[in-house]
């Protein structure tokens, strides 16, 4: 089992269980333009599970990145085991016994479990050869910590997603951390496996390991946490014992503000159905999903990470495979797996990650705006440039894209302007149905407002919009109706008047009941 | 022009000016080489010798014009180029008994068949283009040696036969200009129009810039990549037939060395190995530079082994400079 945490001998005389494993006092971290973490006090006791909650952008990950040594320039005091420390690099964090299990797996898929678990600390014999026997024994020991009984010689590709998740945890535990950070560790796990993970966590608690548990899942927090801290807009809202709070109270702490007048001014003119999906299924991602979109309507799609929203959108428009179901655009069946033809018919998808598979960062703003119009502006294979300048000018003005000229590389623009270029490319196709996947992720407030204006204007012109967003104010503000996805299924539908950030958050956690039911 | 900006309505732009400067650089180097050549030999700059130089680079030029599509669309290089050249030539010779037109058509089709295979596998199955085309080159060499029992085959060249006409192709002239030079210039002009003014050319640029982004922009990526490899095979087949006509023999090793020299010309011409940047006039400049360099080195009596060493070093230097400039511009997103 894990080594005895260091404070066992450093906290002379003090009673083991009440001692603080970690104290953060007045910790701040400033990025250009924003204060990501603002004077936060946070502490974790020895042998405690402390849940950290908050919406996206609340500052949780920045706070954890400070702890794991990603930023050398934070302000404030951090004590580990009662001793003041300066965490200026990931190596320092490791020496202090701080280990983090990230939401995205950091495993190398083609190599063995053993090598993954022991990465960076492979046992070595003379002449630099790996001691395979020692490696396998140590790997088995680490896997034992998470109760995983697989052959460590197998590669990550050969095991399932949830086993890989446990391997990831084993890898961090193998370095014997005293403070363990788990970031949404259950997103890839089934219910049984979550139960097993919680058993493991309880075992770790008994060994005096302090655990920080980041999750959006209220049920998990109530099941495993001893205390919970809520953050919002970079500030700490409060820390409570878990017995003192209810799900409703936690949600209230997380969301706070009321809906902006900016959104309430819009009067949606909802028309005829333009799009219908029924029984959409991609095994392992989403099951039997049906919904309808009307002209002029913005349908929000709410859900926690791993609920299958992005996967649904990508399969629906033909970028990813689909196993079952049908969809029709204006009464005509959609051909699945053929995104170019879907675009030509007027259904367009705005990618979730503008850098990964959204924009052509090395090409100009103009080229990006026109990228989806090449076939439309061509006759017999020859491209006609007649509309180029007017289209470029129109969307640069409409979206207020700030660039020295339409010819500058898109990669040189700010995040907000890049996102506007991506939206402009979608708008330029004049879609009948537009699927927006996190349309304002990582952009500044002004750009976000401009994007929202454009989305509302598009809806007012009669387009139907499916909005996937983890930004609750955005989702609640823009949507005329919200469908709630959980574990790959649509479990609720909420009308405009039922929408609030709290209701949506509860619904995404499967804890919302319609008033009339 | 929208995407490449080569029309008259050029917008003032840094990137366009920069790329103009880059291709101007290639021509400056070419001019410098001409001056060096004049010092070495007094009749270097005569019209006659200029045509000689153009004829000498024509085969490489035709091959490079095709290779440019592959590099431009982000697939780095078609290493099966020598195999396509040899195969189209050998098939053309083998089909000569059926008459010259049939022989030429058969040769072209043979080369295009390899291109289609490359295009399908790299386009649809996302195979690594370098490894796949390397494997194809290896396979085709074995296949040709096996089929023709490791022998060279010769066209029958009795007066008036198809064979005589075939071996005469290389020596045909349009006025004072050799046919092969006309074909090369035609392919470059055509290539420039395709890249700058057709949907296919613009889509190749997008695919070369980011295959993933091209997909979400609604571009038929597999189809675009397919036609890029077809274009490369088309040009390589023409080069192969000319080369076979010149050497008067069809044999498996015929196009050897053209793969690397073509990539060098393309890269010197300013087409980024990472795809999406560059243009045909630049590639033509690159071909001139390689051609002039070879010409001068031959004048100086430098052996072909040493010429290879020098060409290889030039390639390394140019790629190094390209990478350095991207870094220097802070374009780590490139």
Image: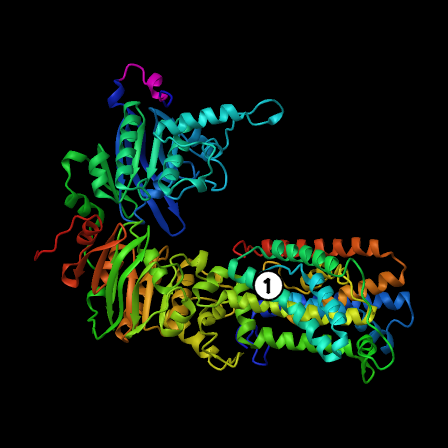
- Left or right for A192, reference A247: right
Residue A11 on the magenta segment: yes
Q: Is residue B14 visible?
A: no
Relative vertical location of residue A76 with respect to residue A408 in this rendering, above or below: above
- Left or right for A235, reference B309: left
- Left or right for B287, reference B333: right
Magenta residues, start to end = A5-14
- Taking the view exactly as shown, the residue that stands out farthest to the top is A13
List the residue tagged with mark 1. Answer: B117
- Taking the view exactly as shown, the residue that stands out farthest to the left is A516
- Taking the view exactly as shown, the residue that stands out farthest to the right is B42
Q: Is residue B133 visible?
A: yes
Residue A387 drawn at (x, y percent): 46, 80
Relative vertical location of residue B235 with respect to residue A476 in this rendering, above or below: below
The structure residue drawn at horizontal position 39% and vertical position 39%, both measured from the top left corner, is A164
Residue B221 drawn at (x, y percent): 50, 65
Quarter the C terminus of chain A occupies = bottom left
Along the line of sight, the residue nearer the viewer: A277 or B104: B104
Residue B181 drawn at (x, y percent): 77, 76
Relative vertical location of residue A387 with respect to residue B250 in this rendering, above or below: below
Relative vertical location of residue B154 with respect to residue A215 in this rendering, above or below: below
Q: Quadrant of residue B20?
A: bottom right
The structure residue drawn at horizontal position 62% and vertical position 61%, both measured from the top left corner, is B272
Q: Quadrant of residue A463?
A: bottom left
How would you rate the neighbour count of disc 1 (Cα within 10 Å): few for under 14, some for 14-19, many for 20 or more? some
Q: Quadrant of residue A165?
A: top left
Residue B212 on the magenta segment: no
The structure residue drawn at horizontal position 53% and vertical position 26%, both measured from the top left corner, is A132
Quarter the N terminus of chain A occupies = top left
The chain ID associated with circle 1 is B
The image shows a total of numbered marks equal to: 1
- Helix, strand or loop: magenta stretch: loop
């Amino acid at each position: 089992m894990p080594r005895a945490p260091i404070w066992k001998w450093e906290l002379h005389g003090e009673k083991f269980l009440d001692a603080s494993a970690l104290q953060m006092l007045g910790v701040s971290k400033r990025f250009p333009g924003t204060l990501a973490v603002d004077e936060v006090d946070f502490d974790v006791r020895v042998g405690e599970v402390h849940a950290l909650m908050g919406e996206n952008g609340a500052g949780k990950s920045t706070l954890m990145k400070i702890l794991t040594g990603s930023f050398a320039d934070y302000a404030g005091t951090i004590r580990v085991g009662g001793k003041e420390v300066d965490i200026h690099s990931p190596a320092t964090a490791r020496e202090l016994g701080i280990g983090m299990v990230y939401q995205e797996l950091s495993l190398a898929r083609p190599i063995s479990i053993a090598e993954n678990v022991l990465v960076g600390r492979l046992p070595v014999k003379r002449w630099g050869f790996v001691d395979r026997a020692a490696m396998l024994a140590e790997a088995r020991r680490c896997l034992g910590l998470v109760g995983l009984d697989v052959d460590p010689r197998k590669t990550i590709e050969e095991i399932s997603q949830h086993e890989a998740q446990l391997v990831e945890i084993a890898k961090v535990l193998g370095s014997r951390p005293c403070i363990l950070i788990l970031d949404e560790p259950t997103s890839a796990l089934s219910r049984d496996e979550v139960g097993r993970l919680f058993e493991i966590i309880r075992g770790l608690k008994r060994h005096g390991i302090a655990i920080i548990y980041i999750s959006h899942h209220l049920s998990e927090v109530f099941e495993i946490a001893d205390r919970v801290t809520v953050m919002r807009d970079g500030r700490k809202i409060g820390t409570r014992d878990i017995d003192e709070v209810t799900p409703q109270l936690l949600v209230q702490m997380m969301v706070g503000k009321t809906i902006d007048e900016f959104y309430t001014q819009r009067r949606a003119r909802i028309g005829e159905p333009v799009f219908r999906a029924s029984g959409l299924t991609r095994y392992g991602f989403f099951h039997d999903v049906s919904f309808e979109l009307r002209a002029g309507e913005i349908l929000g799609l709410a859900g926690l990470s791993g609920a299958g929203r992005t996967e649904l959108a990508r399969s629906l428009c033909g970028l990813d495979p689909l196993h079952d179901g049908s969809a029709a655009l204006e009464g005509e069946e959609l051909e699945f797996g053929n995104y170019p033809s879907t675009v030509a018919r007027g259904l367009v998808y705005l990618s979730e990650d503008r850098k990964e598979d959204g924009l052509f960062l090395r090409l100009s703003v103009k080229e990006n705006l026109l990228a989806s119009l090449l076939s439309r502006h061509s006759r017999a294979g020859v491209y006609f440039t007649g509309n180029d300048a007017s289209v470029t000018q129109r969307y640069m003005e409409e979206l207020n894209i700030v660039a020295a000229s339409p010819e500058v590389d898109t990669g040189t623009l700010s995040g907000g302007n890049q996102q506007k270029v991506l939206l402009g490319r979608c708008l330029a196709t004049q879609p009948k149905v537009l699927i927006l996947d996190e349309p304002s992720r990582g952009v500044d407030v002004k750009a976000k407002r401009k994007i929202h204006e454009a989305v509302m204007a598009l809806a007012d012109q009669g387009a139907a919009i499916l909005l996937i967003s983890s930004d609750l104010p955005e989702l609640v503000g823009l949507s005329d109706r919200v469908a709630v996805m959980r574990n790959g299924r649509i479990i609720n539908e909420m009308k405009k008047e039922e929408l609030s950030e709290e209701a949506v958050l509860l619904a995404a956690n499967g804890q919302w009941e319609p008033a009339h039911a | 022009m929208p995407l490449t900006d080569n029309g008259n309505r050029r917008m003032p732009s840094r990137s366009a000016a920069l790329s103009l400067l880059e291709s101007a650089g290639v021509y400056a180097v070419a001019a410098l080489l001409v001056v060096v050549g004049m010092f070495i030999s007094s009749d270097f700059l005569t019209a006659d010798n200029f045509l000689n130089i153009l004829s000498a680079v024509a085969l490489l030029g035709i091959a490079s014009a095709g290779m440019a599509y592959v590099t431009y669309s982000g697939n780095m290089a078609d290493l099966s180029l020598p195999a396509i050249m040899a195969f189209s030539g050998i098939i053309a010779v083998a089909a000569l008994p059926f008459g010259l037109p049939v022989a030429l058509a058969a040769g072209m089709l043979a080369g295009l068949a390899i291109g289609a295979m490359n295009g399908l596998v790299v386009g649809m199955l996302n195979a690594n283009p370098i490894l796949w085309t390397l494997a194809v080159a290896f396979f085709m060499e074995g296949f040709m040696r096996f089929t023709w029992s490791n022998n060279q085959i010769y066209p029958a060249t009795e007066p008036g036969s198809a064979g005589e006409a075939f071996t005469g192709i290389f020596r045909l002239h349009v006025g004072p200009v050799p046919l092969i030079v006309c074909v090369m210039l035609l392919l470059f002009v055509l290539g420039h129009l395709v890249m700058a003014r057709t949907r296919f050319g613009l889509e190749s640029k997008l695919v070369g810039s980011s295959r993933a982004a091209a997909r979400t922009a609604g571009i038929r990526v597999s189809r675009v990549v397919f036609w890029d490899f077809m274009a490369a095979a088309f040009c390589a087949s023409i080069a192969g037939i000319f080369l076979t006509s010149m050497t008067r023999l069809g044999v498996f090793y015929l196009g050897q060395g053209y793969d690397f020299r073509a990539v060098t010309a393309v890269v010197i011409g300013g087409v980024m190995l990472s795809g999406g940047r560059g243009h045909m006039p630049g590639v033509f400049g690159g071909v001139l530079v390689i051609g002039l360099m070879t010409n001068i080195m031959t004048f100086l009596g430098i052996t072909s082994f040493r010429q290879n060493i020098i060409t290889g070093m030039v390639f390394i230097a140019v790629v190094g400079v390209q990478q350095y400039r991207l870094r220097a511009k802070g374009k780590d997103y490139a």
